Amino acid sequence: MSEIVFAVPGDLSLPTGGYAYDRRVLAEWAALGVAARHLELPGSFPDPSEADLAETGRRILSQPYDSVLLIDGLAYGAFPESIAAGLAGRVVALVHHPLGLEAGLTPERTAALLAREAAALRHASAVVVTSPATKRLLVADFAVPEARIAVAEPGVDPAPRASGSVAGEPLRLLAVGSLVPRKGYDLLIEALSGLADRDWHLTIIGAADRAPATTTALAAQIAEAGLADRIRLAGAVDQAALEAAYARADLFVMPSLFEGYGMVLTEALARGLPILCTTGGAAAETAPDAAAVKVPPGDAAALRAGLARLLADGDERKRRSDAAWLAAGALPGWRRTATIVAETCAKVSP
């Protein structure tokens, strides 16, 4: 292997968990002296045009034949089997979560994406996933041999413990993640609409341009519930603003329908925040039971009950905060993540 070519569709600077993972792996490899470079693929994945598929093929096939191709699943999972088969023996697929498990898809679209990704994965020499839950899913539902899958959980940087809101202010709730259907923010707003008599304020930080119809619907839902002064859609923010939001938060909330890992949960743990989350996908395992109240995904009533409980009980919030802070010490670092991915790629011999 001469080098690792890490192929990622679109703009690597986009503020999503998947792109953050990819950026940090590349940065850690640079620090470690791993021979690797980024290859940008067209940004239309997972719905590429025929022209973009042709351009993808041209860019990938122009790479040295003795390089290993690490291909982000946002692109690889949408490859036609003919392309995946033509790259057999050279590819390590990085699966953040299966494309067909995105929320808001038609049944036909879901079935097509799941079938295409399963077909493409048959031709990958190895697969990197970000959680043991995703590994189990690929083995059970995508027929990927367990021996071909490596787990490289996202790292997390050490952070100061959150100080929370100032006495006399509303309790500050924080949610972080792009405004897309899978994140379940409509359920969170529905849950909070039944708790208008409590003293709270919610900030949702996340890119608002990934699913414009969802963003519009959420804004309308907030207005209709009379919560425009209590729920803020902050959009994407820079790192300094994100750090400040974590520092001021009293409770972290993640209502996702499905997560391949849930990086924001470990970011909350790193700051000692108590958590309310769903058990969708890997989220059930990412947050320790002692630190998080966990509810079924898609259940607004359960979200409301969990919120009511944590808003009312400061002692429970403190116990879960202490458990989160304790768990933070055992979280993996990004150097370990990047090393696992590099070692997986090194085992592939084009």
Image (cartoon, grey):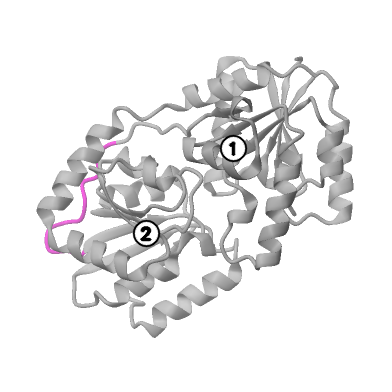
Q: Where does the image place residue 280, in percent across and percent down from the top left?
A: 44, 53
For residue 42, say whether it is visible: yes
Query: Callout 1: helix, strand or loop?
Result: helix
Q: Where does the image place residue 188, in percent across and percent down from the top left?
A: 37, 67
At label 2, counting other C-alpha atoms closer than 10 Å, the crowd grade (few under 14, some 14-19, many 20 or more) is: some
| Picture quadrant of residue 199 | bottom left
The span shown in magenta is 160-170
At label 1, counting other C-alpha atoms closer than 10 Å, the crowd grade (few under 14, some 14-19, many 20 or more) is: some
Q: In front: 32, or 46?
A: 46
Q: Is residue 117 left or right of residue 226?
A: right
> Which numbered marker is on residue 296?
2
Q: Where does the image place residue 17, in percent across and percent down from the top left?
A: 52, 45
Q: Residue at x 73, y 42 (%)?
A: 76
Q: Residue at x 72, y 51 (%)?
A: 115
For residue 230, say whether it is visible: no
Mark 1 highlights which residue? 139
